[in-house]
Image (cartoon, rainbow, N blue to C red):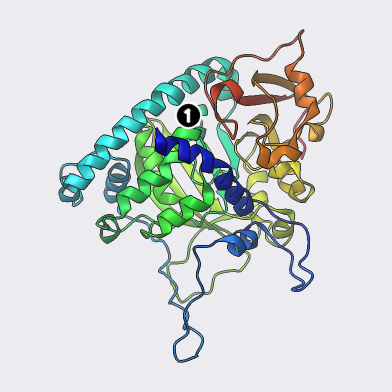
C-alpha cells in the first residue's frame, strides 16, 4: 500500500516527463536557430544520458551503429513473446531452460496475477462494452490507425479485435526481437515488470521511464512489448519483417546490406503478422515517426502511407493533447479527412476542429477537467455535451486515459456523416 501511495504521488511528475517526451514545441530556439520537435525536447530533458567521458582530453569515439533488424525465425519470435509475457515457451524452445529458472518462475507467477487483475478491471469490461457500443464500427473497421500509440497494441486490439490491419505510430524506436543473451540478463524481467506496471494499472505508458527501463536491458524499442502484448492477447506471431516507408510513403523491405546508405527521408518500421485467437490473420505495423507539422513538412511519408490505406477507423488515447495544438495540424487534418469513425478520449482531437454537421457524436463516461498537467486543454464544449439532459452520456464501465479511474474517464465515438475527403 505504501508503494502504491508513493507511486500515485509521483504520477504527475511521470506525466510531465511523458508530455515533454511526446510534445513538439513550435517555438524556435533563439540561440541555436533550430526548431524544437518532439524528439529534441525528449533529448534535452532526459537525465539518463550523461555526457560521454573524454579520454586524454579527446572527444569520445562514436560507437559503431547496431545491425539493422533482420527477419527472425518465426518460432523463436513466438517463444520470445511468450517468455517476455510470463507464458511458457514451446516445449523444444531453447528458451525452455531459462523459463525453468526460479527468477522466471517467480516473474511468470507475478505476471499471471497482474494480467488476471487487468482482465477483471479492463479487458473483460472493455470487450463487453465494445461488443455492444462498437458493433457496427467493427463491421466497418478493417484498418485502424492509432497515432501517438507507442507500443500499445494491447488497447487497440482489445477495442477492435476483428480488424485486419493496425497501424501504430510513435516516437519510440522500432526495436528488434531480443537475442537469447539479452533474455539471460538478470535485470531483464524486473525491467519488463516495471515497464508494464503503468499500462496495467493506469492504461497508459510512462513513455520516458519506459524507455529508460528497457534501454538498460537492451530491449531497444517498441517491438518487444508489442510481441508481449500479442502473446498475452492470445495472438500467435507468424512473421516479423523489418520495413520502411520511402519518401512517397510506400512500404518497402529494409535493405539487408548494412553498407548501403538509407534514404534520410525514409521512416523505419516493422510488420508483424499474427494469427488471432479466432484463427484469422492480422497485420500490425509500427512506424517510428515524429508527427509534428515541422517534421512532417520534411518527412511526409507517415501521413502519405495513412492516406493510401483507404477508409479508416482512428483510435486515440493518452495522446498528451497534441492534436489540440496548431502545430499538429497535418496529422489532425488527415485523421478528420480519412476516418469514418474516431474513437478517442479527450486528449485526442479537440471538439472545435470537428466540422459542424459532418459528425455524429456518442459520449461515454464522465468529463470534468484534464489533469493539472494539461489543465489548459479544458474544453467547455465537452462539459456542455456531458451535461445534456436530453441526450445524456452513456456509462463507461472501465477506466482509460489520464483520468484513469473508471468514475473519471471518458470516450467519444465520432461517426462521419458526409463522404470522405479525397
Whether residue 328 can be seen here: yes
- Point out the image quarter for the N terminus: top left
Measured from the top left, where is residue 380 in percent x and y? Answer: 80, 27
Residue extending farthest top? 390
Taking 339 as reference, is 298 above or below it?
A: below
Instruction: Name the residue at 28% across, 55% down.
Output: 183
- Of residue 9 and residue 262, the one placed in the foreground of this image is 9
Asked which quadrant contains residue 325, the reply is: top right
Q: In the figure, is residue 227 to the left or right of 14?
A: left
Instruction: Name the residue at 76% across, 19% down.
Output: 385
Measured from the top left, where is residue 188 in percent x and y? Answer: 32, 53
- Point out the image quarter for the C terminus: top right
Residue extending farthest front? 2
- Of residue 104 and residue 64, the one placed in the foreground of this image is 104
Measured from the top left, where is residue 98 in percent x and y? Answer: 19, 50
Judging by the rendered image, the residue that carries numbered circle 1 is 158
Amino acid at each position: 500500500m505504501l508503494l502504491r501511495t508513493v507511486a500515485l504521488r509521483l504520477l504527475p511528475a511521470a506525466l510531465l516527463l511523458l508530455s515533454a517526451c511526446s510534445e513538439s514545441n513550435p517555438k524556435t530556439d533563439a540561440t541555436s536557430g533550430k526548431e524544437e520537435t518532439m524528439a529534441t525536447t525528449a533529448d534535452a530533458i532526459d537525465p539518463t544520458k550523461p555526457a560521454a567521458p573524454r579520454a586524454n582530453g579527446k572527444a569520445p569515439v562514436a560507437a559503431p551503429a547496431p545491425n539493422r533488424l533482420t527477419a527472425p525465425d518465426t518460432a523463436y519470435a513466438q517463444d520470445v513473446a511468450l517468455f517476455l509475457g510470463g507464458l511458457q515457451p514451446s516445449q523444444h524452445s531453447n528458451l525452455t531452460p531459462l523459463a525453468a529458472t526460479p527468477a522466471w518462475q517467480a516473474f511468470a507467477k507475478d505476471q499471471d496475477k497482474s494480467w488476471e487483475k487487468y482482465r477483471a478491471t479492463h479487458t473483460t469490461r472493455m470487450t463487453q462494452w465494445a461488443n455492444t457500443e462498437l458493433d457496427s464500427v467493427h463491421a466497418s473497421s478493417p484498418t485502424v490507425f492509432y497515432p501517438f500509440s507507442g507500443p500499445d497494441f494491447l488497447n487497440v486490439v482489445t477495442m477492435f479485435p476483428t480488424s485486419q490491419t493496425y497501424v501504430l505510430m510513435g516516437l519510440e524506436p522500432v526495436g528488434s526481437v531480443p537475442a537469447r543473451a539479452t533474455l539471460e540478463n538478470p535485470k531483464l524481467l524486473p525491467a519488463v515488470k516495471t515497464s508494464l506496471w503503468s499500462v496495467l494499472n493506469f492504461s497508459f505508458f510512462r513513455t520516458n521511464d519506459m524507455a529508460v527501463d528497457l534501454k538498460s536491458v537492451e530491449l531497444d524499442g517498441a517491438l518487444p512489448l508489442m510481441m508481449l502484448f500479442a502473446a498475452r492477447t492470445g495472438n500467435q506471431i507468424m512473421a516479423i519483417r523489418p520495413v520502411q516507408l520511402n519518401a512517397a510513403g510506400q512500404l518497402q523491405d529494409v535493405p539487408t546490406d548494412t553498407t548501403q546508405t538509407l534514404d534520410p527521408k525514409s521512416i523505419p518500421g516493422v510488420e508483424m503478422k499474427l494469427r488471432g485467437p479466432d484463427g484469422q490473420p492480422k497485420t500490425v505495423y509500427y512506424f517510428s515517426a515524429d508527427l509534428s507539422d515541422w517534421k512532417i513538412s520534411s518527412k511526409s511519408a507517415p501521413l502519405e502511407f495513412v492516406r493510401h490505406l483507404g477508409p479508416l477507423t482512428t483510435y486515440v488515447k493518452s495522446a498528451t493533447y497534441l492534436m489540440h495544438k496548431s502545430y499538429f495540424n497535418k496529422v489532425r487534418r488527415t485523421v478528420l479527412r480519412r476516418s469514418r469513425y474516431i474513437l478517442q478520449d479527450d486528449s485526442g482531437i479537440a471538439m472545435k476542429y470537428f466540422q459542424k454537421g459532418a459528425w455524429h457524436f456518442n459520449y461515454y463516461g464522465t468529463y470534468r477537467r484534464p489533469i493539472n498537467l494539461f489543465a489548459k486543454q479544458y474544453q467547455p464544449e465537452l462539459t456542455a455535451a456531458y451535461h445534456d439532459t436530453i441526450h445524456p452520456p452513456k456509462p463507461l464501465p472501465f477506466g482509460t486515459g489520464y483520468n484513469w479511474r473508471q468514475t473519471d474517464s471518458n470516450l467519444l465515438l465520432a461517426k462521419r456523416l458526409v463522404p470522405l475527403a479525397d
